[in-house]
Amino acid sequence: MNHISLLMKDQMTLPKKLLTNYHSMGIAEVDVLVILQIHRFQIEGNDFPTPSELAQFLTITEQECSQVLRKLIQKGYLSIEQMTNEENVINEIYALDGLWQSLVEEKVEYNQGNASQFDDEEQPNMFVLFEQEFGRPLSPFEIETINLWIDEDHQEPALIKAALRESVLMGKLNFKYIDRILREWKKKGIRTVQEAREASKSFRSQQTSGAQTTEESTQKKSDASIYYNWLDDA
């Protein structure tokens, strides 16, 4: 068997619609190449290639590759899922189900296959806001975390922004801290910024009544920050 025959046998299957419909779906040529590389890596046994690994086979940088991944996730064409292997170890994998579903249904709506409470303009603004505060592009995992807050936890975008703002003010800018704020608010039944504002007023009112020692007063002010530091710009 000659080299040409070997080359033609070493192939992978892709939907033809990806090549004919990608432009109308808001997907650029570089996005298609990233998708092709993800698909190739998965065929070869790597279900979660890093931006660095993908960039080795592209003419874009690792950072540019991360931006493409972020855009594909924002539009719902790519997602990050968890799978348990035979050893009961949980691994993250890329899933292109949103892309394939969009091709089947021939729909080009923004974020098809990954519905959220953001409208078309508000969702990218949310990611931009996080990137501005963190001073860097978000990782695919961080983007998926924001999507989970919205899609599964049903958090209001304004409340997520408030939690982000609170983490900045408290000097604890990380996703674990933001998630803890959102969980605490949810535990207290606080689902909107207005509810948080009302809870803040009630909390401060309780603290001003009765005599307090200086140490107690200082501690109360520290505890109250989670409610009122961000309200002025909510």
Image: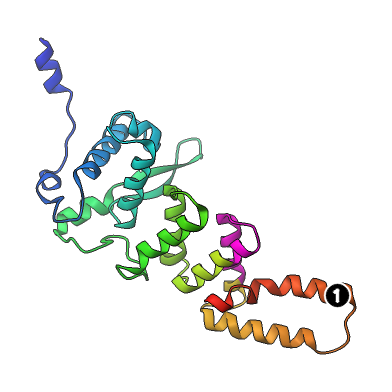
* Residue in the picture at 11% in, 22% down: 8
* 10 Å crowding of disc 1: few (<14), some (14-19), many (20+): few
Percent across and percent down for residue 48 are: 39, 38
Q: Main secondary structure of the magenta part?
A: helix
Q: Tell me if I can see residue 123 in this picture.
A: yes
Q: Is residue 103 left or right of residue 157?
A: left
* Residue in the picture at 45% in, 60% down: 146
From which residue to which does the magenta span run?
A: 166-184
Q: Tell me if I can see residue 48 in this picture.
A: no
- The residue identified by callout 1 is 216
- Residue 199 magenta: no
- Viewer-proximal residue, 89 or 210? 210
* Residue in the picture at 54% in, 70% down: 162
Q: Quadrant of residue 37?
A: top left
- Protein image colouring: rainbow
- Residue 177 magenta: yes
Percent across and percent down for residue 43 are: 28, 32
Percent across and percent down for residue 21 are: 12, 51
* Residue in the picture at 28% in, 60% down: 113
